[in-house]
Amino acid sequence: MSAPILVYHRHDVAQYEAALRARDPALPLAVCSRPEEAAAALRHAEITFSWRLPPDLFRQAGHLGWVQAMGAGVEDLVAAPLPAGAVVTRVVGLYDTFISEYVLGYVLAHSLHMLEALEAQRAHRWADYMIGRLAGKRLGAAGLGSIGRAVVAKARCLGMDVWGLSRSGRADGVAVTRAFGTAQVLDFVAGLDYLAITLPHTPETAGLFGAPAFAALPRGAFVVNAGRGAVVDEAALLEALRSGHLGGAALDVFRAEPLPPDSPLWGLPNVFITPHAAGPNVPVEVVDYFLANLERYRRGEPLVGVVDRSRGY
Ligand code: GLV
């Protein structure tokens, strides 16, 4: 292979380069952290291994055959002007543990009144509250990909009943007691104590959880969003939290990131806000995933994590 592999990451590209070179010093890499450099390198690249490469730059591509995202969500690549025939792959499987631990961690934090406990402790106050118990409560896993399945497994370990929502409405081998399609979102949420969103951002999921869905959630329900901000109508969520209809939320993803300092979400007493940190990239792991796919690519075998661009993930 003579055409280079364009490696692009705005902040951490040196870590990806080091991990790639440690595995194979002879790889023909074009390493870029600035869009201008990437635009030039794209003319000669056959492969990109990148995170958030500005989509318009793909117009510069001359010989691109394969686009590997350094992450799970690919809404930017799905909409990018890629050359016809270029295959897009995303990372599948590396975030399941991180994100499912995040989801169940915040579900437990809510049930155990951790915010209240910390607040009382800081005020040296012997507070009077009763913790909850997850066993017997119901969690709705919105998204039944590999991440959603890991959420389901952990929730079941804690004795929760679990419902699932997926694009197809099928649960194919996932241990949920009921499965719903996106058109049945209101029936799905109506039975939940906890809603855990790990859905990708696609035309079908954009704004799926809006005012009707929040109204349909039972009073006191807790929402975790570790999927994409665009899946939720943020104004409707804010209103449902402010009014006291929802019991709280843990939000890792937002419509605008970083979440602007003046967002009213910061000030809500019953909300955990984290900076898109639920599914961290470990460069060595992502590089190994890429290199295993590179082997397949070189041998002409099917790649892992192929994106169906019509489906959006
Ligand atoms: C991060 O959000 C990712 O999509 O990998």
Image: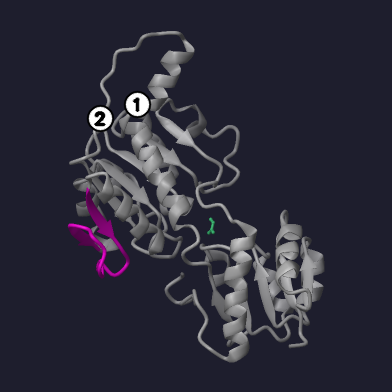
Please state the horizontal and vertical placement of residue 258, each as a whole percent of the image: 60, 43
Mark 1 secondary-structure assignment: loop
Q: Answer left or right for 109 relative to 83.
A: left
Q: Is residue 82 visible?
A: no
Q: Is residue 212 left or right of residue 122?
A: left
Q: Residue at x 53, y 69 (%)?
A: 90
Whether residue 175 is in magenta: the answer is yes
At label 2, counting other C-alpha atoms closer than 10 Å, the crowd grade (few under 14, some 14-19, many 20 or more) is few
What residue do we see at 40% from left, 59% from top? 147
279 over 126 or under it: above or below: below
- Is 213 on the left-hand or right-hand side of 310? left
Highlighted magenta segment, given as a residue range: 161-180
Magenta-span inclusion, residue 128: no
Residue 137, quarter of picture: top left
Q: Is residue 81 above or below residue 224?
A: below
Toward the viewer: 253 or 93?
Answer: 93
The mark that comes first in sequence, 1 or 2, is 1
Q: Nearest the camera: 15 or 58?
A: 15
The structure residue drawn at horizontal position 64% and vertical position 59%, both measured from the top left corner, is: 283
Question: Type of residue at label 1?
Answer: His
Residue 7: assigned label: none
Q: Is mark 1 within 8 Å of ligand 1?
A: no
Instruction: State yes or no: discs 1 and 2 in contact (Cβ < 8 Å).
Output: yes
Q: Which residue is mark 2?
A: 132
* Residue to which mark 1 is pinned: 113
